Image (cartoon, rainbow, N blue to C red):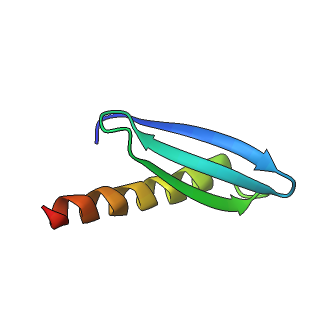
Amino acid sequence: MAEVLYEMVRLGNAVKVTAIDAKTGIEAVVVGSATMSRYSLEQAALRKLQRLLQNLRDRR
């Protein structure tokens, strides 16, 4: 996975983070507390995206 794009949207006291694989366009979404660091939120979304991509590869 060469490039990952992140989108963060604050929803009250929560933040919705979308991690997007730039090559495939596949997205993973996580929701976390607005008090969490940006790095922690991005890492959680990245791990979910990595699991999703691995599951898709394993199905083939």
In the image, 34: left or right of 45? right
In the image, 39: left or right of 59? right
Which image quarter holds the C terminus?
Answer: bottom left
Q: Considering only vertical position in the picture, is 23 above or below 44?
A: above
Q: Position of residue 56 (x, y in %)?
A: 25, 60
Q: Position of residue 54 (x, y in %)?
A: 25, 61
Examine the image and state in which quarter residue 49 appears: bottom left
Which image quarter holds the N terminus?
Answer: top left
Examine the image and state in which quarter residue 30 appears: bottom right
Q: Position of residue 16 (x, y in %)?
A: 67, 52
Q: Name the residue located 17 percent from the left edge and 66 percent from the top edge.
A: 58
Q: Residue furthest left?
A: 60
Q: Residue furthest front?
A: 60
Q: Name the residue located 38 percent from the left edge and 38 percent from the top edge.
A: 25
Q: Considering only vertical position in the picture, is 4 above or below 55?
A: above
Q: Name the residue located 55 percent from the left edge and 55 percent from the top edge.
A: 29
Q: Position of residue 21 (x, y in %)?
A: 38, 40
7 or 35: nearer the viewer: 7
Q: Considering only vertical position in the picture, is 42 above or below 6?
A: below
- Report the label total: 0
7 or 37: nearer the viewer: 7
In the image, 58: left or right of 37? left
In the image, 47: left or right of 34? left
